[in-house]
Image (tube, rainbow, N blue to C red):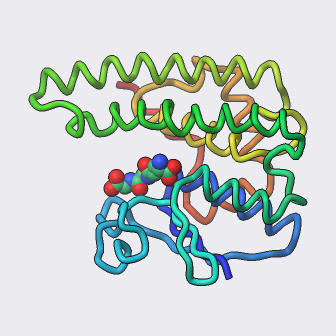
Amino acid sequence: MMELYYGSGACSFVPHAGLEAIKAATGEGFEPRAIKLHKGEQHSPEYLALNPLGLVPLLVVDGKPLSQILAICDFLDRRYPQAGLLPADPWQRAQAMSTFAWMNNTVHPTFTHIFRPGNFAEGEAAQAEVRRLATEKFRAALERIQRMAEKAAPFLLGDKLSFVDAYALVFLRWGGLVGIDPASLPGYKAYVERVAALPPVAAAMAREGINLETYRPK
Ligand SMILES: N[C@@H](CCC(=O)N[C@@H](CS)C(=O)NCC(=O)O)C(=O)O
């Protein structure tokens, strides 16, 4: 039995969409377990006993926990290769992992600097500076993803949905929350709309109660 601990709109959407794609391709289901991050449920003693990092996502497989998006998604792909969420060819797979790792270790933490500047600097002026610089870097990363998407249409790795498409969707939503207008990234926006229209992705979005309309001008 597989259980996925996720937070609405968080990076846990990546394995969440993947698990829906696996369900569609193989019939293998999972138990979704919502964690309310804004209420701090990730810090509850019950959750910390499962994941001492206090973060989502967490995949629990037959009672055994697995954390970290890359590890979870690599496991899911190796167990359910029929879903085609990562390439089988070693070189293409390595290229996909290169993009996936960059998203996870660079783009994602850059956003964290915008969203939680207090984790990185003390004082209002210093935090405003962290936020400003991180927003520039995050925007540049989104532009890079846009170029990749324009080259590789319809999806980032070609014909099929991959975990990296779900991550790209998360980033565009997050960008909207911090004042990056998706209309200023038309190639990215059109690509993410294609991703969101896929039934497994739409199912995960519906469960999380999220949509693509996050943009708030700053
Ligand atoms: N490197 C981790 C990042 C996980 C992460 O940053 N999760 C965020 C949501 S996007 C979280 O749980 N934040 C809750 C908190 O910081 O309290 C992974 O790949 O799983």
For the residue pair 190 and 157, the one nearer the viewer reads as 157
How far from the left and from the top, in percent, is residue 192? Answer: 70, 36
Instruction: Locate the N terminus and report the quarter of the image it occupies.
Output: bottom right
Q: Reply above or below: 134 against 10.
A: above
The residue at 33%/32% (across/down) is 113
Q: Reply above or below: 76 against 10.
A: below
One can see residue 56 in this view: yes
The residue positioned farthest toward the left in the image shown: 123
The residue at 49%/20% (across/down) is 139
Along the horizontal axis of the image, is 95 left or right of 208? right
Q: Reply above or below: 196 against 106.
A: below
How far from the left and from the top, in percent, is residue 96? Answer: 74, 36
How far from the left and from the top, in percent, is residue 6? Answer: 51, 64
For the residue pair 185 and 28, the one nearer the viewer reads as 28
How far from the left and from the top, in percent, is residue 77? Answer: 77, 57
One can see residue 10 in this view: no
For the residue pair 15 and 50, the one nearer the viewer reads as 50
Instruction: Find residue 204 and report its image quarter.
Output: bottom right
Instruction: Locate the C terminus and report the quarter of the image it occupies.
Output: top left
Number of numbered discs on residues: 0
Along the horizontal axis of the image, is 114 left or right of 152? left
Q: Reply above or below: 58 against 85.
A: below
Instruction: Find residue 37 and report its image quarter.
Output: bottom left
The residue at 39%/66% (across/down) is 36
The residue positioned farthest toward the front in the image shown: 90
The residue at 53%/72% (across/down) is 65
Along the horizontal axis of the image, is 8 left or right of 124? right
